């Protein structure tokens, strides 16, 4: 998930910083170029990647309960979805709310104009009666503007456990910004993947077909493509670890042999020892206790919880 707007200069600076650090790291937001987006779509269809189906199950089985919270006192509201993707899960809620005659506007927000154009076209075809007001823009820029100019209740939605790609400190900062952009009657509805049998988590991030490995390795391809790098990508190996004590899944790229890599645009040579790591992503798994802690630190209070039948995944509703 990309939660901020980035420029080429950010990419160059971050690659330089990450690959000259010890231990080496790269930010996972850079996985998502057009190829990375396509690979993530494939990940969401993998049987091992349970997150998508769990959230879909919650939406399918608890549609009325979830949307009744959104409706509240029935004054009408804007449903703002940050990083809406293909909207598959959200359409379940939209269809129900439209059939029930709820007064709402659906406002998907994404920094990718392509994503917004595809979603708008599919909504027009599938749910033409739902009033939709898509926006291309950076999340907080859109939310702050809405706070100032739109006095209707807002329900802000962020699905897919995207928050899990942030370490707790950054997750708290992100939720605090979210809280600041809310009026007192607004709500925040978010997905948080839960702690579970560690093997289930490891399998989700290490599928046998190698899609997740290709997704992770896309970082190196992207550096080669955009920054004139000469990474021998086939000499790197995707590696996943999960620490059940902290609930943190971590992705790495391992250099399978010692090598030197040159990145033209940075005029930079980087040495790798054999089996040296590049840390590329965290995918945090949560408990209610941890969610209440980070939400509380951000000035948010949990007011409802929806879970799937296996307790793998939860959607929480917060108010400020
Ligand atoms: C987008 N994000 C929530 C995914 C996750 O589960 O951390 C990204 C992902 N990385 C590997 N597989 C999926």
Image (tube, rainbow, N blue to C red):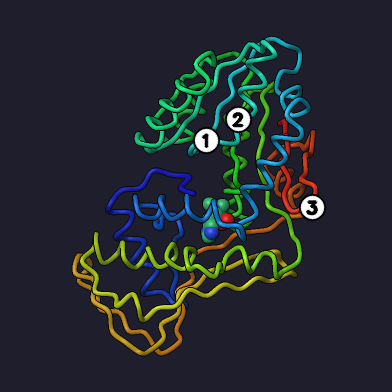
- Crowd class of label 1 (few under 14; some 14 to 19; many from 20; radius 10 Å): many
Q: Is residue 258 above or below residue 154?
A: below
Viewer-proximal residue, 33 or 9? 33
Q: Which residue lies under the disc numbered 2?
A: 156
State whether residue 228 appears in this view: yes
Q: Is residue 276 above or below residue 125?
A: below
Q: Which mark is residue 310?
A: 3
Name the mark on residue 82. 1
Question: Residues at badges 1 and 2 in contact (C-beta under 8 Å)?
Answer: yes
Mark 2 neighbour class, 10 Å CA radius: few under 14, some 14 to 19, many 20 or more: many
Q: Is residue 147 left or right of residue 9?
A: right
Chain-order first, disc 3 or disc 2: 2
Left or right of 75 on screen, residue 81: left
SS for dot 2: strand
Report the disc number at residue 229. Answer: none
Q: Secondary structure at mark 1?
A: strand
Compared to residue 9, the image places residue 308 above or below, namely above
What residue is rendered at 44% in x and 35% in y?
110
User: Residue at point 63% right, 34% down?
Assistant: 179
| Residue occupying image coordinates x 73% and y 45% | 314
């Amino acid at each position: 998930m990309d939660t901020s707007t980035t420029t080429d200069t950010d990419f160059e600076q971050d690659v330089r910083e990450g690959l000259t650090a010890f231990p080496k790291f790269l930010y996972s937001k850079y996985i998502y170029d057009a190829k990375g987006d396509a690979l993530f779509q494939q990940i969401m269809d993998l049987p091992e990647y349970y997150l998508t189906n769990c959230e879909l199950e919650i939406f399918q089985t608890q549609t009325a309960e979830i949307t009744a919270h959104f409706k509240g006192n029935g004054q009408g509201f804007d449903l703002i979805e940050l990083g809406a993707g293909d909207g598959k899960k959200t359409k379940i809620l939209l269809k129900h709310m439209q059939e029930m005659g709820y007064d709402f506007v659906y406002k998907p927000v994404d920094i990718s104009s392509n994503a917004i154009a595809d979603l708008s076209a599919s909504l027009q075809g599938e749910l033409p009666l739902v009033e939709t007001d898509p926006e291309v823009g950076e999340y907080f820029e859109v939310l702050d503007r809405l706070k100032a100019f739109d006095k209707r209740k807002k329900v802000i939605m962020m699905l897919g456990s995207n928050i899990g790609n942030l370490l707790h400190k950054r997750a708290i900062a992100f939720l605090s910004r979210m809280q600041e952009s809310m009026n007192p009657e607004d709500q925040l509805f978010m997905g948080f993947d839960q702690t579970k049998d560690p093997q289930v988590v490891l399998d989700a991030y290490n599928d046998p077909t190698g899609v997740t490995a290709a997704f992770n390795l896309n970082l190196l391809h992207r550096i080669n493509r955009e920054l004139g790098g000469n990474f021998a990508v086939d000499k790197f190996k995707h590696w996943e670890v999960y620490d059940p004590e902290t609930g943190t899944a971590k992705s790495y790229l391992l250099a399978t042999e010692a090598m030197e890599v040159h990145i033209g645009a940075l005029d930079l040579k980087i040495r790798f020892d054999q089996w040296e790591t590049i840390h590329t992503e965290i995918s945090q798994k949560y408990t209610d206790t941890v969610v209440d802690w980070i939400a509380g630190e951000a000035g948010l209070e949990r007011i409802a919880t929806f879970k799937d039948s296996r307790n793998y995944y939860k959607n929480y509703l917060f108010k400020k």
